[in-house]
């Protein structure tokens, strides 16, 4: 296994999130505007990793035990993976699949994600892996399901599409969902073009991405109530995936350029939203960085494009 560890400094800037309103799990700034302050040193260790033979690695979530899940490409096939805290990596493939992604892991070790079958490669199904047993899941009529998050109580959130040929994320084909007690609840932010549910917080609040009036920002949903907010300076986020933890911290990815924001595109950066501050996360020397998962200790996982153009996974240890 290849790894790179180094100490870096991340700059934290206090900001007002445009369009932000206080909601469940959100400590939004209450001032009309907050001036930036001096850069704050945050001692962090960045570690890169790749499953053996991988030509593309992306980490999607991390639990309190330091277990990381994600996806990797090897010999033209996409596999899910589980990385233990000691660095041991196990491949995850849904039985009979031609494509598997592990999207989230809770503290009990239950994993959710999505897969395709070789006979229907354009149709993606969600799955749950618990105790070595796989179970498939799809909202009614779905042709493309991404199970992106699983809570400690086993509730699953994600996004789905029902058209025959789903366009890339951000074009308006996806809706969010919550799977609880064997039933699906559809999540649509009122007036939004697209809603994508990422993860669920300990208090039951669901965090996700939303496209409204050409702005790709964040939402928090709880007890039937949606609150939306955007990053400062018109920075659009990626709607593919993001993360949150029990403390209410949120991680995701934003783009320098306007328009639909995609993971891995040049000029993308990870971000941490915590207690009203947005911190940019860039892997040292990377061409692009995406942050997708965060645990209760504040450790963050995601992916980056290195100087040679290689997509790799990373862990940011912040303890």
Image (cartoon, grey):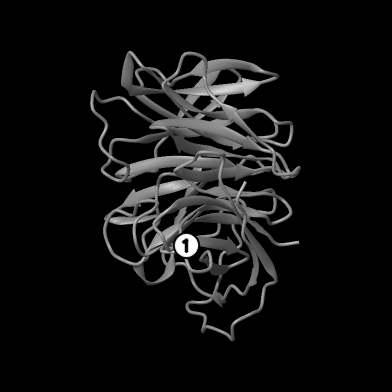
Between 190 and 43, which is closer to the camera in this rendering?
43
For the point 42% across and 41% down, the residue is 196
Above-or-below relation of 196 to 313: above
For the point 70% across and 44% down, the residue is 87
Q: Quadrant of residue 4?
A: bottom right
Return the x and y of residue 249 as percentages of the image width and height.
Answer: 62, 56
Residue 230 appears in the picture as rendered: no
Residue 309 appears in the picture as rendered: yes
Q: Is residue 120 left or right of residue 221?
A: left
Q: How many marks?
A: 1
Above-or-below relation of 134 to 37: above
User: Mark 1 = which residue?
Assistant: 20
Q: Is residue 268 left or right of residue 199?
A: left
Q: Quadrant of residue 43?
A: bottom right
Q: Is residue 131 left or right of residue 139?
A: right
Above-or-below relation of 161 to 251: above
Q: Quadrant of residue 299?
A: bottom right
Above-or-below relation of 269 to 92: below
Between 260 and 206, which is closer to the camera in this rendering?
260
Q: For the residue labelled by badge 1, is the local secondary structure a helix, a strand or a loop?
A: loop
For the point 34% across and 50% down, the residue is 211
């Amino acid at each position: 296994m290849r790894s790179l560890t180094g100490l870096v400094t991340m700059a934290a800037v206090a900001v007002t999130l445009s369009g932000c309103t206080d909601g469940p799990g959100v400590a939004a700034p209450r001032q009309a505007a907050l001036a930036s302050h001096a850069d704050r040193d945050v001692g962090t260790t960045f570690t890169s990793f790749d499953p053996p033979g991988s030509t593309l690695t992306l980490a999607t979530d991390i639990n309190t035990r330091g277990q990381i899940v994600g996806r990797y490409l090897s010999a033209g096939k996409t596999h899910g993976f589980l990385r233990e805290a000691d660095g041991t990596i196990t491949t995850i493939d849904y039985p009979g699949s031609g494509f598997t992604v592990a999207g989230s892991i809770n503290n009990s070790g239950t994993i959710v994600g999505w897969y395709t079958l070789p006979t229907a490669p354009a149709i993606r199904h969600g799955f749950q892996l618990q105790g070595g047993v796989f179970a498939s899941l799809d909202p009614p009529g779905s042709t493309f399901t991404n199970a992106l998050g699983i809570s400690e109580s086993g509730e699953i959130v994600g996004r789905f599409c029902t058209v025959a040929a789903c366009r890339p994320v951000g074009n308006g084909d996806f809706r969010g969902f919550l799977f609880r007690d064997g039933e699906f609840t559809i999540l649509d932010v009122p007036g939004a073009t697209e809603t994508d549910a990422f993860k669920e917080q300990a208090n039951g609040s669901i965090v996700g991405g939303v496209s409204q009036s050409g702005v790709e920002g964040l939402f928090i949903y709880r007890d039937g109530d949606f609150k939306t907010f955007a990053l400062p300076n018109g920075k659009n986020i990626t709607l593919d995936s993001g993360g949150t933890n029990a403390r209410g911290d949120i991680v995701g990815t934003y783009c320098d350029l306007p328009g639909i924001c995609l993971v891995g595109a040049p000029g993308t950066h990870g971000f941490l939203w915590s207690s009203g501050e947005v911190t940019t996360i860039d892997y040292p020397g990377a061409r692009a960085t995406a942050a997708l998962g965060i645990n209760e200790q504040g450790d963050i996982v995601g992916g980056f494009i290195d100087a040679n153009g290689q997509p790799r996974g990373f862990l940011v240890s912040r303890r």
